[in-house]
Image (tube, rainbow, N blue to C red):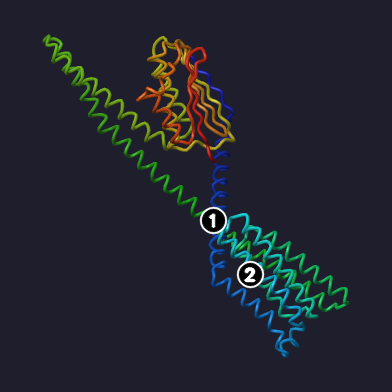
């Protein structure tokens, strides 16, 4: 036997890889939690009732200066409030329509939401400026904008930048009027609002990170329980049913020898079938036990078992080579994929051993952005109609590849070469 093992994985990287995977899992869960939180918040905000209420508030602000006492308090007339609040109301309605059409994560809605935010802060700043005082009630536009940061912690930096630019421009406009008191008030509210946006967003993100941690821990616990149950089932099958089958096989062989001594050909044939059935059942049970155990084991342990099984298949004069190219930065192979990989390799090698009349069989496994399995031999080559007429091994390989979202292909290249490509998601 000739074994070739090549790997880019260093021995001290396993701990770091595990830590990186844990951090990666946390990032994935945090991103998922933030997306769900954002979509849920927008679902309430973009409801018909909420949209109607916001438009009603804008209409109230637009028409309030028509009442003379309110106009004196606000410092602006309806000729100013009406066009500005109309722009704001239209942006609100546009965002609501976009949400209904494409959802919270659609590009149209994201653009509509940014446009709505821009209109809100711009109209609010304009109304405050035209009111002639930095203590205007029109800061309510900014209040709603700041409070919404809780629902959208992912875009906190954009919100802070937009708010800061608007309040800075407003302070500069008051400075041109030489209204130092208004400049001070605007600057103070600008800093306070930016801090509030940051605090609201950070608080929401902290809560969502806690939720993501709980999800990761829950997933690990479920996986641990499944692995323990698999190990228990595998142990029970190995120590119970497998032991009984081994005893049955041993007794059947004894019976075969006894019947052979009698010279009854028909009885000998029946006992031969019994021995073969018992051996096949025992082999199949061992495969099941291995599948249960390898699902919860480490990748290196899986590769060691794969080498052992290829060695058994290549027993005799056939020479087997195996090459493993393992990228330490690649995602780990999911446990349910490993059994499929083993079955594909076993079937590919078994076909070369039984049908190809090969002298050398080479198995190559590459783990990178995807899993690539190559099984090649120097035998007679695969018949052209082998895959279309197959009802067993070849069709099973193709089916396993399709189940995992990959593909399998066979070619003649001084023998037969099987190439199976499987996607490997992070």
Residue 416 shown left or right of residue 141 in the figure: left
Up-down relation of residue 335 to residue 315 (above or below): below
Q: Position of residue 165 (x, y in %)?
A: 77, 65
Residue ID for mark 1: 33
| Badge 2 element | helix
Q: Residue furthest bottom?
A: 69
Total numbered badges shown on the rendered structure: 2
Q: Residue 9, located in which quarter of the rendered image?
A: top right
Q: Which mark is residue 147?
A: 2
Judging depth in this view, the residue of 41 and 328 nearest the camera is 41
Residue 290 shown left or right of residue 261 in the figure: right
Quadrant, the C terminus? top right
First in residue order: circle 1 vs circle 2: 1
Q: Residue 47, located in which quarter of the rendered image?
A: bottom right
Q: Position of residue 91 (x, y in %)?
A: 66, 67
Residue at left 13%, top 9%?
A: 261
């Amino acid at each position: 036997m000739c074994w070739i093992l090549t790997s880019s994985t260093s021995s001290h990287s396993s701990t770091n890889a595990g830590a990186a995977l844990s951090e990666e899992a946390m990032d994935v869960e945090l991103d998922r939690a933030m997306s769900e939180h954002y979509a849920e918040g927008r679902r309430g905000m973009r409801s018909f009732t909420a949209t109607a209420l916001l438009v009603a508030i804008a209409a109230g602000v637009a028409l309030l200066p028509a009442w003379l006492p309110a106009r004196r308090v606000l410092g602006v007339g309806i000729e100013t409030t009406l066009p500005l609040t109309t722009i704001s109301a239209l942006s609100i309605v546009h965002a609501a329509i976009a949400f209904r059409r494409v959802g919270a994560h659609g590009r149209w809605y994201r653009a509509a939401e940014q446009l709505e935010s821009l209109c809100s802060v711009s109209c609010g700043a304009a109304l405050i400026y035209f009111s002639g005082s930095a203590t205007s009630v029109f800061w309510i536009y900014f209040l709603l904008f700041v409070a919404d940061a809780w629902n959208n912690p992912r875009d906190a930096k954009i919100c802070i930048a937009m708010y800061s630019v608007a309040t800075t421009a407003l302070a500069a406009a008051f400075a041109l009027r030489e209204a130092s008191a208004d400049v001070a008030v605007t600057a103070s509210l600008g800093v306070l609002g930016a801090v509030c946006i940051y605090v609201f967003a950070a608080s929401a993100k902290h809560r969502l990170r806690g939720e993501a941690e709980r999800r990761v821990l829950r997933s690990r616990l479920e996986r641990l329980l499944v692995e323990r149950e698999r190990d228990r089932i595998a142990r029970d099958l190995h120590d119970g049913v497998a032991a009984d089958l081994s005893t049955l096989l041993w007794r059947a062989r004894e019976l075969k020898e006894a019947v052979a001594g009698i010279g009854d050909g028909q009885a000998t044939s029946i006992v031969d079938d019994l021995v073969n059935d018992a051996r096949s059942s025992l082999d199949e049970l061992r495969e099941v036990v291995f599948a249960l155990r390898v699902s919860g084991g480490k990748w290196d342990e899986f590769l060691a078992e794969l080498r052992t099984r290829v060695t058994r298949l290549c027993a005799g004069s056939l020479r087997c080579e195996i090459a493993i190219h393992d990228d330490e930065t690649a995602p780990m192979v999911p446990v349910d994929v490993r059994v499929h990989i083993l079955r594909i390799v076993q079937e590919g090698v078994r076909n070369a051993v039984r049908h190809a009349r090969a002298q050398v069989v080479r198995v190559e496994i590459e783990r990178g952005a995807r899993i690539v399995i190559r099984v090649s031999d120097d035998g007679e080559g695969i018949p052209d109609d082998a895959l279309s007429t197959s009802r067993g091994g070849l069709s099973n390989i193709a089916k396993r590849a399709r189940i995992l979202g990959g593909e399998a292909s066979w070619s003649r290249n001084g023998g037969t070469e099987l190439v199976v490509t499987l996607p490997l998601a992070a």
